[in-house]
């Protein structure tokens, strides 16, 4: 991918003393880099300036910049490539797929996945959706349903809610025509990058449309994964309720 490295002029050293709450210098540099990412100065897949250039820009040492970049790389916000530089992480990278999908096969490797869009409509946020997405009741939202197949079997049924103002032309046709993962589509078409998520897991019984779409009997055991995904600035931009069929799969999370 061709880098779109932004040109810039050195700025006077940043005055950090005005901050009312103490934060380590490298964290303040990290926040400044995050602001540039949020503004779109460096987009997903772009190379960011070298540590020497960033140190000059912010008026700090290269060691301080390196510590900030190291932490952002650990958080999957940036990607270091040996001999090439540091790049903004992108959902187009195949390695990012399982960062937000903690599904594993009970035996062997997980088959190739297929996303099957079922519905996409527009409406107004009710109380629960508004709370989850930081909206006001009545604000426009997009509502989606889809199936995630692994091999020939449906394994995950998702109900997804999005702020309508961020995804103004999202439609069922758009979803069906896309050959990208859902988060990659959000990133490339709408400029919305998911950078972290909070999840809650529940054991539930299959009911209604979830049972129908997953081809299981009513009251069959399912795993419900509720997720709120956030973009830059800790802004919630997706609320998802995923119903997982766990007869041949399980939810896997590695704790360090």
Image (cartoon, rainbow, N blue to C red):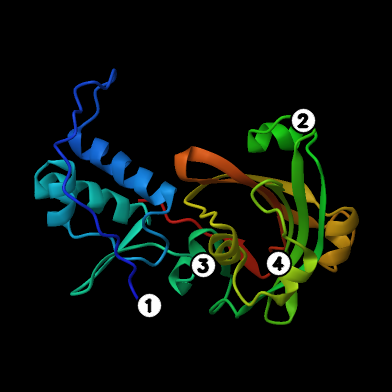
Give the mark, 2 or 4, whose residue is nearer the N terminus: 2
Q: Tag 3, which secondary structure?
A: helix
Q: Nearer the viewer, mark 1 or mark 3?
A: 1
Of labels 2 and 3, earlier in sequence is: 3
Q: Nearer the viewer, mark 1 or mark 4?
A: 1
Expressed as whole percent of the image width and height from the top left, the position of residue 97 reads 51, 67
Q: Are marks 1 and 4 in contact (CB under 8 Å)?
A: no
Q: Mark 4 highlights which residue?
A: 247
Give the left or right position of residue 109, taking residue 144 as reference: left
- What is the C-alpha distance between the residues marked 2 and 4? 38 Å
Disc 1 target residue: 1
Task: Report the Cα–Cα distance between label 3 and label 4.
Answer: 22 Å
Q: Which residue is mark 3?
A: 97
Q: For the residues carrying marks 2 and 3, which lies nearer the camera in this image?
A: 2
Say the numbered circle drawn on residue 67: none
Q: Secondary structure at mark 2?
A: loop
Q: CA distance from mark 2 to mark 1?
A: 42 Å
Return the disc, 2 or 1, that comes first in the chain's sequence: 1
Q: Which residue is mark 2?
A: 137
Neighbour class for label 3 at 10 Å: few (<14), some, many (≥20)? some
Tell me where residue 128 appears, x and y as whole percent.
75, 33
């Amino acid at each position: 991918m061709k880098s779109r490295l932004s040109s810039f002029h050195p700025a006077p050293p940043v005055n950090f003393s005005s901050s009312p709450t103490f934060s380590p210098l490298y964290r303040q540099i990290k926040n400044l880099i995050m602001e540039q990412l949020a503004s779109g100065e460096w987009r997903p897949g772009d190379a960011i300036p070298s540590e020497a250039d960033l140190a000059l820009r912010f008026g700090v040492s290269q060691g301080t910049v390196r510590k900030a970049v190291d932490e952002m790389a650990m958080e999957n916000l940036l990607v270091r490539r040996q001999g090439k530089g540091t790049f903004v992480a992108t959902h187009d990278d195949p390695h990012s797929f399982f960062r937000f999908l903690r599904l594993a096969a009970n035996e062997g490797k997980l088959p190739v996945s297929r996303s099957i869009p079922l519905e996409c409509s527009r409406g107004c946020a009710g109380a629960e959706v508004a709370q989850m997405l930081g909206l006001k009741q009545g604000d426009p939202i997009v509502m989606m349903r889809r199936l995630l197949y692994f091999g020939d079997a449906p394994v995950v049924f998702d109900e997804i809610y999005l702020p309508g103002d961020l995804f103004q032309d999202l439609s069922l046709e758009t979803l069906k025509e896309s050959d990208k993962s859902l988060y990659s589509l959000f990133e490339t078409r709408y400029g919305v990058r998911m950078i972290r998520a909070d999840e809650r897991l529940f054991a539930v019984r299959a009911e209604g449309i979830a049972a129908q779409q997953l081809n299981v009997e009513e009251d069959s055991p399912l795993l419900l994964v509720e997720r709120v995904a956030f973009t830059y600035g800790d802004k919630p931009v997706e609320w998802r309720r995923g119903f997982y069929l766990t007869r041949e799969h399980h939810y896997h999370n590695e704790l360090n």
